[in-house]
Amino acid sequence: MNNLQAIIFDLDDTLYSERDFVLSGFRAVANWGTANLGISQAQGYETLFDLYQQGIRNNTFNQWLQIHQIPAVSSSEETQSEVVAKLLDIYRQHTPQIDPFAESIELLKILTQSYKIGLVSDGYLEVQQRKWAALGLDHFFDAVVFSDSLGRENWKPSTAPFELVLERLNVAPEFSVYIGDNPRKDFFGARQLGMSTIQIKRIDAEYSHIPAPSLDYCADLTFDSLKDVLGAIAILNE
Ligand SMILES: [Mg+2]
């Protein structure tokens, strides 16, 4: 049908496990809590881990301070919000201890022989840049777009970051495919432009099992793992 020229990837939960980033951030927060709040490192980390396992995704650090009964914090709301802001800073500014999925590297080694390779990733710019540096994948990529560099309004599902990566790769949308995990935002903008789309639906990923808001948000093809991507590309190239 079409002959693909560019393969473009999402980052979080597509090329590495976002859970690993979260737990890496929790280790940094637990270390800070040990030095500054007197919370034991092992207990502090375990509490954060338990909150995560329970599905807590928003006021994690508020709950963490309450569980550890930090007296100076629980007595004053203002102090608590200051400490939580500091914990968020620690989390976002830590140097991530994360690795790509083994299959990411295997796949990229093969794809770089035949295709241009791109990245489109959402999230706070400096956080995403730190993840990217930690993963050591940059040498495989011809164009890297962090949508936050275009402004918050241009995060996916905006078409803008896709237009930019295609421009940098000098490839037309119909000759490209975007590979991501999150049906709420990864595929809509790419499809609007005429790109092909592949969803990687890992069994333990955070967003891959949420429903797409409508058919326009669904990927063309869905697979369990990046290991299936070479087969998917063969299908798209038929
Ligand atoms: Mg993702």
Image: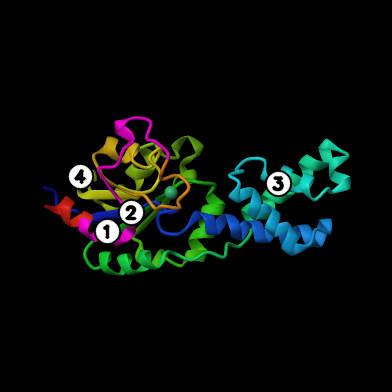
Badge 3 is on which residue? 61
Magenta-colored stretch includes residue 213: yes
User: Real-space Cα distance between discs 2 and 3?
Assistant: 33 Å
Residue located 44% across and 53% down the image: 13
* Circle 4: residue type: Glu
User: Real-space Cα distance between discs 3 and 1?
Assistant: 38 Å
The answer to whether mark 2 and mark 1 are in CB contact below 8 A is yes
Task: Respond yes or no on whether mark 4 lies under 8 Å from ligand 1.
Answer: no
* Circle 2: residue type: Asp
Magenta-colored stretch includes residue 149: no
Say which mark, if any, is on residue 228. 1
* Circle 3: residue type: Phe
Task: Respond yes or no on whether mark 3 lies under 8 Å from ligand 1.
Answer: no
At label 1, counting other C-alpha atoms closer than 10 Å, the crowd grade (few under 14, some 14-19, many 20 or more) is some
Badge 4 is on which residue? 174
**Residue lying furthest top in this view?**
214
**Which mark is nearer the camera, 4 or 3?**
3
Say which mark, if any, is on residue 224. 2
Expressed as whole percent of the image width and height from the top left, the position of residue 187 reads 33, 41
Residue located 63% across and 59% down the image: 94
Among the two numbered marks 1 and 4 on one chain, the one whose residue lies closer to the N terminus: 4
The answer to whether mark 4 and mark 3 are in CB contact below 8 A is no
**Which mark is nearer the camera, 2 or 3?**
2
Residue range of the region highlighted in magenta in the rendering: 210-231
In this rendering, the answer to whether 101 lies above or below 55 is below
Secondary structure state at the residue bearing disc 4: helix
In this rendering, the answer to whether 90 lies above or below 154 is below
Picture quadrant where residue 62 is located = top right
Picture quadrant where residue 16 is located = bottom left
Picture quadrant where residue 28 is located = bottom right
Residue located 73% across and 57% down the image: 44
